[in-house]
Amino acid sequence: MQIAQGGSYWILTAVLLFVVVSLLSFFMTGIVQRLLFFLSVILALISILLIIFFRDPDRKTGNGIVAVADGIIRAVNSIQDEDVGNAFFVSTFMNIYHVHVNRMPVDGTIKKITHIPGSHLPAFTKESERNERVIMLVETAKGLVKIILIAGTVARRIVPYVKNGEHLKKGEKISLIRLGSRVDVILPKKMNVEITVTKKDRVIAGVNMIAASNA
């Protein structure tokens, strides 16, 4: 199984602790041995969960403008964005059991990456707009697309895989949000697209279409 870039350290740390605690338990007796054995079981479970959390399966890129994140659509709106202008807003909530690797929705060039420090409130609440985030502006052939990666209560780290000026194809990996959170995509209406998802739809990053081009 392929592990996401940025996740191996977490897995190796948990596995190493499991091995050390397990070995120590063999040299102990009584209540100390039982406590160490119990701790080794917990560490084994954590190791397995981290492998699941940081899995990075191969994906066949879908048609149209594809989802940036695995998860559940939490909102689809029309907004006025300071960078994009009159736009469609599609927000996806990522749970801890989803794949946490994010992907490009369209072909484009990374124009600007901005990291904004903030809180770590639950990502499904309105207050999460004050959370730590990374904003990516993507220049495409049809206009500027904005991707907002938002940390949550558990997700304390956003790991960008890309840099300014880098040109990427649709479906390529752009980041990892450790242990789930939220991703917003803002598409300019001048791109002449039709949103193809609604609230509560489940999507897979790089595979499922969130908008179809009418041009």
Image: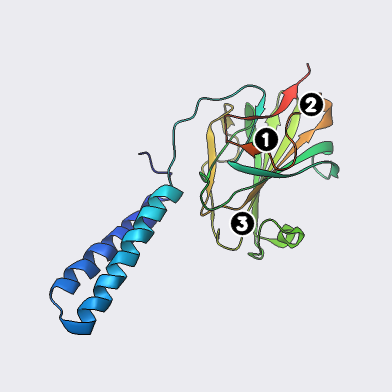
Q: Nearer the viewer, mark 3 or mark 2?
A: 2
Q: Please tell me which residue is depicted at 25% across the width and 74% down the height of the picture.
A: 36
Q: Is residue 113 left or right of residue 160?
A: right
Q: Please tell me which residue is depicted at 61% across the width and 59% down the height of the picture.
A: 152
Precedes in sequence: disc 3 or disc 1: 1
Asked if residue 145 shows in the view, the reply is yes
Whole-angstrom CA distance, mark 3 to mark 1, is 20 Å
Work out whether 2 lies above or below 43: above
Residue under pointer 1: 138
Badge 1, how many Cα within 10 Å: few under 14, some, many 20+?
many
Q: Mark 1: which secondary structure? A: strand
Precedes in sequence: disc 3 or disc 2: 3
- Where on the picture, by quarter, is residue 105? top right
Residue under pointer 3: 151
Whole-angstrom CA distance, mark 1 to mark 2, is 19 Å
Whole-angstrom CA distance, mark 3 to mark 2, is 28 Å
Q: Is residue 190 left or right of residue 112?
A: right
Q: Nearer the viewer, mark 1 or mark 2?
A: 2
Work out whether 114 lies above or below 33: above
Q: How is the image coloured?
A: rainbow
Question: Label 1 amino acid?
Answer: Val
Q: Position of residue 4 (x, y in %)?
A: 43, 44
Precedes in sequence: disc 1 or disc 2: 1
Residue under pointer 2: 194
Q: Mark 2: which secondary structure? A: strand
Q: Residue furthest bottom?
A: 31
